[in-house]
Image (spheres, rainbow, N blue to C red):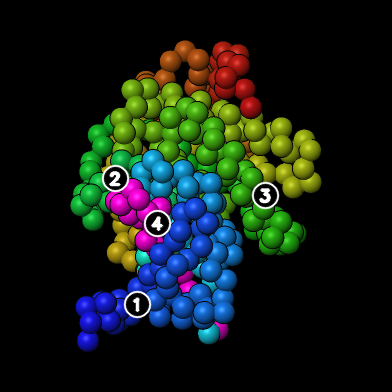
Amino acid sequence: MSIEAINEQLLRAIGVGVALVDLDTMELKFRNDTFLEWFGGAEASGRVADLFPSLDPEALAAHLQTDGSFTSETSFKLKRRRMTVALEFTRTNDPSERIAVLVCQNITRIKELESMIDSYSMMVERNTHEIKREKEQVEKLLLNMMPRSAYEEYKSFGVVAPRIFDSVSVLTLDFEDFDRILEANDPAVIVSELNDIYTAFDRIGEQFGCERVRTNGDSYFAVSGVPDPVQNHSESVANAAVRFLRYLARRNESHPIKWNARLGLASGPVIGSVVGVQKYIYDVFGPAVERASRTRVLAPPMAIAAHVSIRDLLDSRFTLAPLVPKQSRPAPQEGLFLLTETAAPEAQGTL
């Protein structure tokens, strides 16, 4: 077997098509068996432009003249299967012959792998985006259950260590005749009303440095000074309480359901921590919470009752008068006061 025949068999074995191109006529002078199998037998056109219509002949000629080589790709259908071939034109070094060697290599599998990699990359990117979105939703949910500093501690260590806060102020609120309102209205209406009201309370509280701890039906509980210290925590809850009532009063003017709230304020120490293992929530409890809850019970509708623990922490913008509950005895309740705002509300706090 001649060297040429051996080379031909080797080229055929590795799936490479070879042809010689006359650069003057752009016709094929030689085609091996693999080339003929891919692009037609001897009866097929021998012109480069006919075999590769997507090829730019001017670009081919320019690159062969300057660089001596030119590469491209072409796709075609072979026996019901789409095939992609890499084309490489290389001009010979013999200046007496204007001939280029055309080598065609089957890169169908490579293209399929590239397509698979691209699809996998897109899938990974899509899954990463989905995981990121779900992570953001989980973070948003957890931030609704606990303050950010507690969430950061939980994210870093898996637990939130209980802390004692020596001086904070607490605001508690509930609605009068809540059971009657429930009986007289559709549950969906009640939920919608409470959602609007508590959302407004959250915004007001955030404006004055109060953190909502929890809601429980008709009750709302917020604190100032937990877990991040607030210098004037007593004034924060007092300002928020006054504006809670102002918001409800204005809302009642235009809504069929009249919400009459009672509020209790107190200061003192509390403990803050995440309570629970599976259904956990950041909770605050301690003397200040108990004082505010007991004080709220004695407050008249649409009024703010303040415990003596917060009295000396408030400035002259608030007036404290002895609280006289609605009992048969008209004597003031010792240590409890009715809080009102003395100064005109500032523009930023008007709601």
> Which amino acid type is marked by label 1?
Gly
Q: Earlier in the sequence, mark 4 or mark 1?
A: 1
Image disc number at residue 152: 2
Secondary structure beneath dot 2 equals: helix
Q: Badge 4 is on which residue?
A: 99
Secondary structure beneath dot 4 equals: strand
Image quadrant where residue 325 sits? top right
Badge nearest the viewer, 3 or 4: 4
Question: Are the residues flagged by discs 3 and 4 in contact, CB closer than 8 Å?
Answer: no
Q: Badge 1 is on which residue?
A: 15
Question: Are the residues flagged by discs 4 and 1 in contact, CB closer than 8 Å?
Answer: no
Q: Residue at (37%, 22%) from the top-left corner?
A: 232
Taken as a whole, is the magenta stretch helix, strand or loop? Answer: strand
Badge nearest the viewer, 3 or 2: 2
Badge nearest the viewer, 2 or 4: 4
Secondary structure beneath dot 3 equals: helix
Q: List x then y, in percent, for residue 93.
A: 29, 51
Q: List x then y, in percent, for residue 132.
A: 41, 54
Q: How many marks?
A: 4
Q: Quadrant of the C terminus?
A: top right
The magenta-colored residue range is 80-102
Marks 2 and 1 sit apart, C-alpha to C-alpha, by 60 Å
Q: Badge 3 is on which residue?
A: 193
Image disc number at residue 134: none
Q: List x then y, in percent, for residue 178.
A: 64, 53
